[in-house]
Image (tube, rainbow, N blue to C red):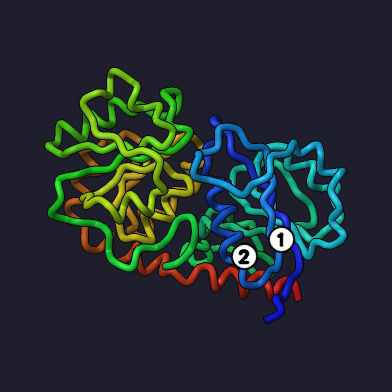
């Protein structure tokens, strides 16, 4: 069967100071569009990419002038850094938009997965909403579980604060200790195997080298402590109640809708881990049910349809 489009390039980034969220999102978009496009390649500035991520092409964005875009139906851009360089390429552009990033890209259709994070977006000509996030029951590398993941009877708590969870952004030891004080067993996601080397965390359990969906499916956690990046879409889709910790001002903007929609608890403004635990314990079923309905697994299909309509 002939596909609707011939060739697409996705440009993204993965670096220690940024984390792997942009790359994971790009991989999900690639998977969502695979039935529409014959050839999809991912290019970007990559440094210390997790070993389980393959099939990407490392470049410097200054090399864009060397690319031939004549056979590309469109490109997708998911990077904050050096975004202005993409203004000079002559091809249809889709920009993964995040409110709070003040680097313009002209003549691009915006895709904002963070719902109402930016009211300046004109919905008619752009794509906006959690419902378009491309995580489905068979999507790769992350996926929506076919079951409701949260286990209210469990005593285990997962802490997963991603590739940018350094001490300048979040006090991991303090968070782990607070969970332990409340009589929970603490598990820390550690894909880079760096956190387990810290002597101050030696009393905790670590989970290495897995995607978040796999971790949630293989263990029975009561709830999780998450950052405000790409992981929130995975936990929401799986029905896992979470305490979300904004690690920077940008994530603080993107987490504004979490409590409005009853999708979890957001730390900050004098709120403590104990406040979050109380909220999760007393709203468990409602959070879990609403989460699975909000990101229902049909985002890849919606994204396909929306992009196809814009490209007509």
Q: Considering the numbered disc 2 on the image, is that residue within a helix, a strand or a loop?
A: strand
Above or below for 277 versus 121: above
Query: Dividing the image into 4 quarters, which one contains the C terminus?
Result: bottom right
Q: Position of residue 262 (x, y in %)?
A: 33, 58
* Residue depicted at 62% across the width and 66% down the height: 33
- Residue at 45% in and 67% down: 138
- Secondary structure under tag 1 reads strand
Specify which label sits upstream in the sequence, 1 or 2.
1
Mark 1–mark 2 Cα distance, whole angstroms, equals 8 Å
Disc assigned to residue 109:
1
Q: Position of residue 163 (x, y in %)?
A: 47, 35
User: In the rendered view, does 172 fall on the left or right side of 139?
Assistant: left
Position above or below: 259 against 1: above
| Residue found at the very far bottom of the displayed protein | 1
In-front residue for pair 103/140? 140
State the residue in front, 142 or 169. 142
Residue count near mark 1 (Cα–Cα under 10 Å), binned few <14, some 14–19, many ≥20: many
Q: Please state the horizontal and vertical placement of residue 184, each as a whole percent of the image.
A: 16, 39
Left or right of residue 211: residue 9 = right
**CB under 8 Å between discs 1 and 2:** yes
Q: What residue would you read off at disc 2?
A: 127
Q: In which quadrant of the rendered view does residue 267 lie?
A: top left
**Residue 292 bears which disc, if any?**
none
Q: State the residue at coordinates (51%, 62%).
A: 133
From this view, report whether residue 76 is shown above or below residue 267: below
Q: Position of residue 203 (x, y in %)?
A: 21, 26
- Towards the viewer: 108 or 32: 32
Instruction: In the displayed orientation, state which residue is furthest to the top.
Output: 199
Q: Nearer the viewer, residue 79 or 203?
A: 203
Q: Residue at x 29, y 18 (%)?
A: 199
Q: For mark 2, does the 10 Å Cα neighbourhood hold few (<14), some (14 to 19), or many (20 or more) residues?
A: many
């Amino acid at each position: 069967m002939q596909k609707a489009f011939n060739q697409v390039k996705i440009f993204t980034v993965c670096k220690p100071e940024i984390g792997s969220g942009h790359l994971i999102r790009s991989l999900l978009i690639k998977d969502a569009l695979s039935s529409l496009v014959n050839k999809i390649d991912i290019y970007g500035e990559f440094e210390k990419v997790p070993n389980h991520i393959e099939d990407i092409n490392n470049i410097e964005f200054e090399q864009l002038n060397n690319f031939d875009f004549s056979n590309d139906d469109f490109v997708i851009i998911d990077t904050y850094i050096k975004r202005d360089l993409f203004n000079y390429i002559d091809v249809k552009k889709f920009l993964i938009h995040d409110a709070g990033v003040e680097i313009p890209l002209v003549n691009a259709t915006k895709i904002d997965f963070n719902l109402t994070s930016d009211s300046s977006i004109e919905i008619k000509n752009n794509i906006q909403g959690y419902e378009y996030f491309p995580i489905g029951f068979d999507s790769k590398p992350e996926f929506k579980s076919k079951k409701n993941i949260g286990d209210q009877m469990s005593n285990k708590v997962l802490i997963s604060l991603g590739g940018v969870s350094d001490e300048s952004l979040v006090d991991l030891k303090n968070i782990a200790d607070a969970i332990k004080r409340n009589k929970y067993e603490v598990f820390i996601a550690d894909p880079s195997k760096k956190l387990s080397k810290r002597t101050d965390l030696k009393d905790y359990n670590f989970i290495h080298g897995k995607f978040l969906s796999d971790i949630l499916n293989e263990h029975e956690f009561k709830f999780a402590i998450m950052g405000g990046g790409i992981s929130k879409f995975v936990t929401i889709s799986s029905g896992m109640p979470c305490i979300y910790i904004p690690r920077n001002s940008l994530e603080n903007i993107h987490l504004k809708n979490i409590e409005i929609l009853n999708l979890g608890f957001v730390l900050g403004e004098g709120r403590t881990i104990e406040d979050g635990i109380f909220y999760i314990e007393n709203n468990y079923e409602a959070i879990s049910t609403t989460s699975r309905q909000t990101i229902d697994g049909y985002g890849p299909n919606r994204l396909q349809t929306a992009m196809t309509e814009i490209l007509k």
